[in-house]
Image (tube, rainbow, N blue to C red):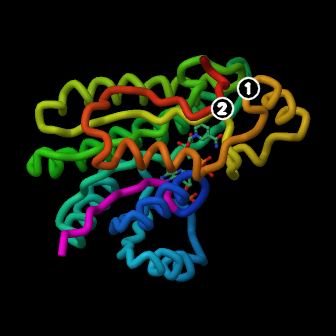
Amino acid sequence: MEEKKVALITGGTRGIGKAIATRFAKQGYNLIINYVSDKTDLKSLEEEFKQYNSEVLFIKTDVSKFEDCEEMVKSSIEKFGKIDVLVNNAGITNDNLILRMSVEDFEKVIDINLKGTFNVTKNVVQYMMKKRQGKIINLASVVGISGNAGQCNYAASKAGIIGFTKSIAKELASRNILANCVAPGFIDTDMTSILNDNVKENIYSQIPLKRMGSSEEIANTVYFLASEENTYITGQVINVDGGMLM
Ligand code: NAP
């Protein structure tokens, strides 16, 4: 029997991360699912993934802490022996206009979104390099390309992720490791549920497809980039945004 592939997904217990984890489970992967907040429903989540015959290792780790990420990756390798796919999905927003944004608010978003992506990737690539194969998919955002009033911290973190991804794509290509970004537009998750109806209507008016995207629509693109169907796309940003940014 062919050995199962292994994917590590950060922030994988809810929203886009959970949809990505579910997609990989359905495709026969074993999973390492990272999270940070206390969870009461891990048992039922585990049961959910078992129906796809996926073995899942849940690891509570704050991706903004380098040493903790080192431990997370070590435990993952101890359990599964390899990581074929890394999806850096964990991310937060903390919006404000620049004049009202505190240094702490700016740093927190950069530390989790951008430094977190570095922290996990640096620890994973050494194992991918030894195997001379791997796929890395980083969750950016269309606002990392276009900018957005009230999100200078978040947009900077996502623009940083794009530069980071292109750089490692160049560094790691010779080892057959492909790195790409998926840039979602406006997706229906906890992150966007805080917006009021007026703001949402205003955003819909800027989307040619006139609706929010679903987490599953993001997961489909992430899975394609990670799959054996993708052998020649690296260093790219794929917008999944209903045409919001063209
Ligand atoms: P979400 O529903 O708010 O979920 C955020 C996820 O990140 C949660 O799983 C959370 O874990 C995890 N997380 C937060 N801080 C973390 C930390 N320090 N260490 C580890 N994990 C942490 O967000 P989402 O909408 O699914 O977004 C997922 C990704 O897509 C993010 O990178 C986001 O920036 C990007 N994105 C989303 C949209 C959108 O419209 N929703 C648009 C563009 C880009 P816990 O569950 O443990 O708290």
State the image quarter where residue 129 is shown. top left
Verify whether residue 4 appears in magenta: yes
- Give the distance between the C-alpha atoms of the residues marked 1 and 2, in whole angstroms: 6 Å
Give coordinates of residue 138: x percent, y percent.
Answer: 41, 39
Considering every residue shown, the one lying at the far right of the view is 198
Q: Specify whether 3 is left or right of 119.
A: left
Q: Give the range drawn in magenta.
A: 1-12
Q: In this view, does 168 lie above or below 55?
A: above
State the image quarter where residue 206 is shown. top right
> Label 1's element?
loop
**Around disc 2, counting alpha carbons within 10 Å, would you say few (fewer than 14), some (14 to 19), or many (20 or more)?**
many
The residue tagged 2 is: 242
The residue tagged 1 is: 208
Give coordinates of residue 91: x percent, y percent.
Answer: 53, 44
Q: Which of marks 1 and 2 is nearer the N terminus?
A: 1
Q: Nearer the viewer, residue 174 or 151?
A: 174
Q: In this view, does 205 lie above or below 181?
A: above
**Around disc 1, counting alpha carbons within 10 Å, would you say few (fewer than 14), some (14 to 19), or many (20 or more)?**
few
Q: In which quarter of the image is the C terminus?
A: top right
Give coordinates of residue 101: x percent, y percent.
Answer: 68, 26
Q: Which of 8 and 223 is in front in this view?
A: 223
State the image quarter where residue 198 is shown. top right
Q: Is the magenta stretch mostly helix, strand or loop?
A: loop
Residue 64, visible in the rendered structure: no
Q: Nearer the viewer, residue 78 or 69?
A: 78
Q: Specify whether 222 is left or right of 184.
A: left
Amino acid type, residue under disc 1 in the picture: Pro
Q: Specify whether 137 is left or right of 3.
A: right
Verify whether residue 113 appears in magenta: no
Q: In this view, does 187 lie above or below 28?
A: above
